[in-house]
Image (cartoon, rainbow, N blue to C red):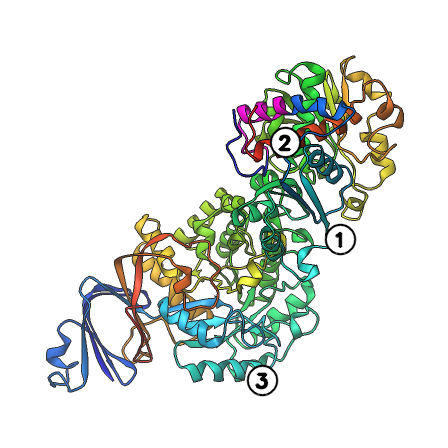
């Protein structure tokens, strides 16, 4: 299929491109970028070939396909929350052409067969590119390494303890060392489980007032500090998942200044909401790490602005109604994010915190570089993964319309501006007018 | 004047006028419990369900007696485990109860916010009889009623609350209520028992009980839960009793006419010495007596009564 995207604002931070132009897609690849492509047929002297779809994208933004490097697709094991198919539908609906999925499934993605299963399922539904992240340790029990080489061969692109933080510093050291010899990142969920034990929300004035047990910011920060020291010592690439506190941002900023190989991500709820949202006891606001205080939210925003935080990832964590329609104490934690992530992130541009290219960089090429995947670019010959955004489109979040099985969002009924209207994966339109 | 709300979930959202209304109504109900025939027909034909997911003697009995003295029918449901452990969700349990058309559901639950969840779903009035470490509004109301009765008012009094503030719903509700009504409130306990930012609730924090109770008009002692020892909230009952109990020695820091309160159940010899608990300053049993009147007032006001 040949597609010509005409007249949009093309923003490709991987090559510092930002300007109005056309984009030609042929045979699943980017075949040209520039002005007036239909006349020249990308310099081949041809006219408009038969079967070419020409889309007028004036007023729209054309960017490399968005990458969400932190999602939970729940399959295998928790299909009642999400499947690879439903998660992929949610991804392309939200403008994401590639997602990386965390290993806390059942069974845990700690061996080749689970990684292969995920890739096969993803290929069967054929919507988004799905990149499995394997576990740091067998069954994520924090005791023994799994087979990193074998997992890499099977298609895993990183290792993470997401949801089951590694409390054993010696294991974390070995994981970093072992992964570094494969040139793969270790993605750390930084939480000291002794400090966070029993906690339901951020520990601060709101938890004091409403009497929910708190998770202090230091539960995150002591582990960020530990893992930075381990990364510094081993020289390995450490990626910090879902940064949520001011102290974590400061530690990462300082580590980067020292030259430590560290990257970091945060999620839209951490730069959008604070612990004040928990006052209603709405279980949709229950998430780990928890929604933090206003000073943390502001520090995360500053970390995005000054480049301390490289990536915005949704930490898409779908849950079923039965997981959430219970007392706050017993509710599962997590927020469904794939279908709101882009619009919430575009608010940062609207508010002047980031330029549009800076934002797109954090949602495309930066994640691609961290995961060493050949994505996040509109370079000639690259896979034609493209997201078209209508920046003016106002819409109201309706969880009932989510493609994801998870309807657990604290943003239900929010009016947001900006939406993916076209998602192209490998040259095929996977979501139109999403 | 009528109480213009469906539920009583906490003191935080009550206005001074509403608290006054409840306390005045409660004062008028005191007399019922002193009669030969301790029953009035006010709530005849109404049904009150006590849904208790946490152990309780005082509060549950008090609600039941309050309802019965107003001629309401009462049903007590005690779940020894949480709804989740039991297999039926709280929402399902509540919807089943709703289907039987009660008028008021009184709920106690270990999870903060559980009554708020029900209030948002059920058409019945919900009374929070204690939710986690969040609020225990009827306790604070009966405490305020007792203080008013003994001191003639609340404004201007110095109140010291001593103990595990962090895990206490009684402390939170009383801090909201007493500061609203114009009292000066301070809290004291080991730093492990003082939650972060509590000053922002309008209280002063003292690290030593002697400083907290200095010149106090009211001392409110909180129950120490022994299971907190395992969480390293305090090292031993022995040490706690030595440094944070109210006793003959330190009571001298307070005003001569100080009143001693405790929400119960008391750990004698831990947070309070037995002679003080039973002595002339103690109004602990007056609190219990007034608890019935306050709960009668709430049941009455929530079913549309006016003062």
| Residue A231: in magenta span | no
> Is residue B180 something that shows in the picture?
no
Question: Mark 1 sits on what residue?
Answer: B80
Give x and y (percent) for residue A390. Answer: 26, 62
Q: Residue at x 70, y 33 (%)?
A: B66
Span highlighted in magenta in the image: B11-25
Question: Mark 2 sits on what residue?
Answer: B42
Q: Secondary structure at mark 3?
A: helix
What quarter of the picture does the N terminus of chain A occupy?
A: bottom left
Disc 3 packing (10 Å; few <14; some 14–19; many ≥20): few
In primary-sequence order, the first of circles 2 and 1 is: 2
**Chain ID, mark 1:** B
Left or right: A30, with B224 as reference point: left
Left or right: A81, with B194 as reference point: left
Q: Quadrant of residue B149?
A: top right
Q: Nearer the viewer, mark 3 or mark 1?
A: 1
Query: Which labelled disc corresponds to residue B232?
Result: none
Give x and y (percent) for residue B65. Answer: 74, 35
> Is residue A218 something that shows in the picture?
yes
Question: Mark 3 sits on what residue?
Answer: A113
Disc 2 packing (10 Å; few <14; some 14–19; many ≥20): some
Q: Quadrant of residue A143?
A: bottom right
Q: Residue at x 33, y 72 (%)?
A: A377
Give x and y (percent) for residue A265. Answer: 47, 60
CB atoms of marks 2 and 1 within 8 Å:
no
Q: Using the image as rendered, state which of residue A305 and residue A431 is in the foreground.
A: A431
What quarter of the picture does the C terminus of chain A occupy?
A: bottom left
């Amino acid at each position: 299929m040949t597609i010509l995207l005409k007249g949009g604002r093309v923003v490709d931070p991987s090559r510092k491109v930002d300007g109005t132009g056309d984009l030609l897609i042929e045979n699943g690849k980017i075949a040209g970028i520039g002005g007036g492509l239909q006349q020249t047929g990308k310099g081949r002297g041809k006219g408009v070939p038969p079967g070419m779809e020409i889309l007028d994208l004036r007023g729209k933004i054309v960017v490399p396909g968005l990458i969400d490097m932190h999602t939970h697709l729940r399959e295998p094991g928790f299909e009642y929350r999400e499947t690879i198919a439903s998660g992929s539908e949610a991804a392309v609906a939200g403008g994401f052409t590639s997602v990386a999925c965390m290993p806390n499934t059942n069974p845990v993605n700690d061996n080749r067969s689970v990684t292969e299963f995920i890739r096969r399922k993803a290929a069967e539904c054929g919507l988004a590119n799905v990149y499995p992240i394997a576990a740091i340790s067998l069954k994520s029990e924090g005791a023994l390494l799994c087979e990193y080489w074998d997992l890499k061969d099977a298609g895993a692109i990183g290792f993470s303890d997401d949801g089951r933080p590694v409390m054993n510093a010696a294991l974390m050291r070995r994981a970093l060392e072992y992964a570094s010899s494969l040139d793969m990142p270790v993605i750390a969920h930084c939480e000291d489980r002794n400090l966070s034990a029993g906690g339901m929300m951020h520990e601060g004035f709101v938890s004091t007032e409403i009497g929910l047990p708190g998770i202090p910011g230091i539960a995150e920060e002591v582990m960020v500090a530990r893992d930075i020291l381990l990364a510094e010592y081993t020289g390995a690439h450490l990626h910090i998942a879902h940064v949520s506190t001011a102290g974590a941002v400061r530690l990462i900023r300082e580590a980067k200044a020292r030259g430590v190989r560290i990257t970091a991500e945060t999620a839209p709820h951490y730069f959008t909401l604070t612990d004040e949202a928990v006052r209603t006891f709405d279980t949709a606001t229950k998430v780990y790490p928890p929604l933090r205080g206003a000073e943390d939210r502001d520090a995360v925003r500053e970390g995005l602005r000054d480049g301390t935080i490289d990536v915005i990832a949704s930490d898409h964590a779908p849950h079923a109604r039965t997981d959430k329609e219970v007392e706050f104490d017993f509710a599962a934690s997590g927020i469904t994010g794939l279908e709101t992530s882009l619009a919430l992130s575009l608010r940062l541009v609207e508010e002047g915190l980031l330029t549009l290219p800076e934002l797109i960089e954090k949602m495309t090429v930066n994640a691609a570089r961290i995961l060493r995947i050949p994505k996040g670019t509109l370079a000639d010959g690259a896979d034609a993964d493209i997201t078209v955004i209508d920046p003016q489109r106002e819409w109201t979040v309706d969880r009932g319309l989510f493609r994801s099985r998870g309807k657990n969002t604290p943003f239900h009924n929010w009016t947001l501006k900006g939406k993916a209207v076209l998602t192209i994966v490998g040259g095929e339109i996977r979501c139109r007018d999403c | 004047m009528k109480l213009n709300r469906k539920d009583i979930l906490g003191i935080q959202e009550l206005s001074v006028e509403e608290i006054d209304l409840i306390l005045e109504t409660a004062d008028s109900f005191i007399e019922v419990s002193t009669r030969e025939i301790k029953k009035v027909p006010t709530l005849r034909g109404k049904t009150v369900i006590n849904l208790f997911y946490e152990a309780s003697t005082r509060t549950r009995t008090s609600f039941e007696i309050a309802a019965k003295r107003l001629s309401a029918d009462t049903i007590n449901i005690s779940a020894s485990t949480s709804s989740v452990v039991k297999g039926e969700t709280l929402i399902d349990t509540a919807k089943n109860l709703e289907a039987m058309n009660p008028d008021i559901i009184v709920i106690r639950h270990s999870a903060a916010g559980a009554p708020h969840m029900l209030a948002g779903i059920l058409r019945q009035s919900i009374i929070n009889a204690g939710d986690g470490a969040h609020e225990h509004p009827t306790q604070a109301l009966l405490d305020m009623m007792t203080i008013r009765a003994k001191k003639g008012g609340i404004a201007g009094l110095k109140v010291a609350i001593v103990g595990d503030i962090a895990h206490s719903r009684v402390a939170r509700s009383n801090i909201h209520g007493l500061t609203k009504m114009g009292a000066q409130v301070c809290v004291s306990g080991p730093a492990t028992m003082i939650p972060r930012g509590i000053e922002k609730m309008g209280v002063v924090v003292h690290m030593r009980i002697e400083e907290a109770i200095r010149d106090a008009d009211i001392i409110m002692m909180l129950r120490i839960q022994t299971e907190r020892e395992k969480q390293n909230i305090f090292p031993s009952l022995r040490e706690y009793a030595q440094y944070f109990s109210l006793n003959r020695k330190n009571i001298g820091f307070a005003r001569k006419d100080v009143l001693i309160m405790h929400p119960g159940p008391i750990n004698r010899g831990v947070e309070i010495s037995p002679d003080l608990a039973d002595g002339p300053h103690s109004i602990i049993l007056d609190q219990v007596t007034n608890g019935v009147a306050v709960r009668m007032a709430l049941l009455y006001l929530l079913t549309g009564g006016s003062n």
